[in-house]
Image (tube, coloured by chain):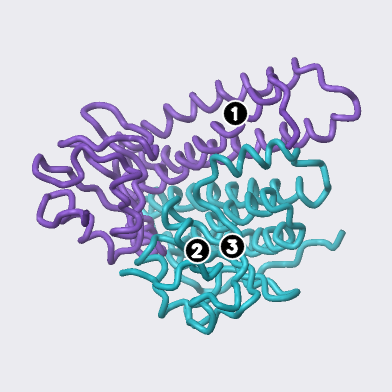
Chain colours: A purple, B cyan
Amino acid sequence: MVQPKKPFKRIVDKLVELKDTSEHMMDLAYSSLLLNSSELAEEVQALEEHVDNLHTEFELLVLSSGFKPEESKDFLGLIRLGVVTETIADAAAQIAEVVLRGIEPHPVLRLVIEEAEETVTRVKVSRNSSLVGKSLRNARLPEETGMWVLSIRRGKKWLRPQPHTVIKCEDVLIASGYSEGEEDLRKLASGETVLPE
Amino acid sequence: MASPEKIEYKPIPVRDLLIEMKDISELMIDLAYSAALFHSRELAEEVLELEKRVDTLAYILNMNAMLAARDAEDAEALAGVSVVATATDKISDAAADIAIIVLREIGVHPIVREAFERVEERLTRTEVKPNSILVGQKLEALKLAAKIGVDIIAIRRKKEWIINPEDDEIIKKGDVLIARGAPMGIQEFKGLAEGKIQKLEG
């Protein structure tokens, strides 16, 4: 394997963060629409600002990396990928804006998300749930319930779920997945059912 | 370059159009990154085909939304629908831009690919071995999404690509499956396809 040079590694790390954040925004934007949640929509807007900053840092890193003329194609590829993530972030912000404008979303919009292949649900983790204290990796929610956690609300903060994020009681999990899994997740969060050992 | 075709009005419910646009655009993002990750021109071309489909749907959606508005209140609500559709279309355009990077050989540097592979917990490509328990199974019978949280988004069968396969598609040996899902599920899925895991739990 080619050992990446230091500046290159920093550039790629930034790109990976851009990609992750923009996709996270897309999920959150559709969720905000379904839940008619202006908090979630505001989070998307805040993330949009974050992505704008990240993207600028990313482009500056690329431009100041001192690449050689023969490397320019590879660096063009990087810049283009960066633009793509920015476009996705913009689109997500646009969707969230519809929610923030405060018009009661047209019934058409809400039906859309519900009948799309995936559904979005919000569950609160109760004190006696077996999820408390588990990392998302160990909770294996997608495998157990088919539900994928999009975002975690803890108090006034929205956390971006990572495999090592530990679930706490009172957390609100926003998850998407197939509608069959919704009830399973709700039961796990309430403590009605327990995660298998 | 061929000039774009005229798109004719079809009476399709706005809701159905939006659902299809949302599903296709999300699928396109995953397929486009898969094309970049696995360096597949064919997959990139499929993404461009889907992009045309989303464009057409967006036009038809706007036509239907215009006809659906009877008064100012309707117009207010439907303008929101139209904005969402435009944003969804924009996402599909972004996916197409990734495909173009792959097709024009602009270059996705191997180091970028490695970095994506390292963090990409959602996408995988795997070949179905003859001794895999997936061979001969219908997708709907496997219930991969419900059991391990994995979704097959494309199948390459010899020269042919099957994008977003239907429930009644039967997996054959030698198929190359592109799937998305949770990290643990993805690992299990690879084991199943490679014949290393002989039982699907759940």
Q: Give amino acid for label 2.
A: Gly
Quarter assignment of residue B57: bottom right
In the rendered image, residue A142, in percent from the top left (x then y), is placed at: 35, 55
- Tell which subunit mark 1 falls on: A
Horizontally, is A35 left or right of B133 in the view? Answer: left
Residue hosting label 2: B191
Work out which residue is located at the far right of the displayed protein and give it.
A70
CB within 8 Å, label 3 to label 1? no
Whether discs 3 and 2 lie on one chain: the answer is yes
Horizontally, is B104 left or right of B73 in the view? Answer: right
Whether discs 2 and 1 lie on one chain: the answer is no
At a point 50% along the width and 60% down the height, the residue shown is B23
Q: Give amino acid for label 1.
A: Asp
The numbered mark at residue A93 is: none
Task: From the image, state whether disc 3 or disc 2 is nearer to you.
Answer: 2
The numbered mark at residue B178 is: 3
Horizontally, is A196 left or right of A49 in the view? Answer: left
Q: Give amino acid for label 3.
A: Ile
* Nearer to me, A128 or B96: A128
In the rendered image, residue A117, in percent from the top left (x then y), is placed at: 41, 64
Mark positioned earlier in the residue sequence (3 or 2): 3
- Name the quarter where the C terminus of chain A is drawn: bottom left
Horizontally, is A10 left or right of A95 in the view? Answer: right
Q: CA distance from mark 2 to mark 1?
A: 29 Å
Task: From the image, state whether disc 2 or disc 1 is nearer to you.
Answer: 2
At a point 73% along the width and 75% down the height, the residue shown is B158
In the rendered image, residue B180, in percent from the top left (x then y), is placed at: 51, 57
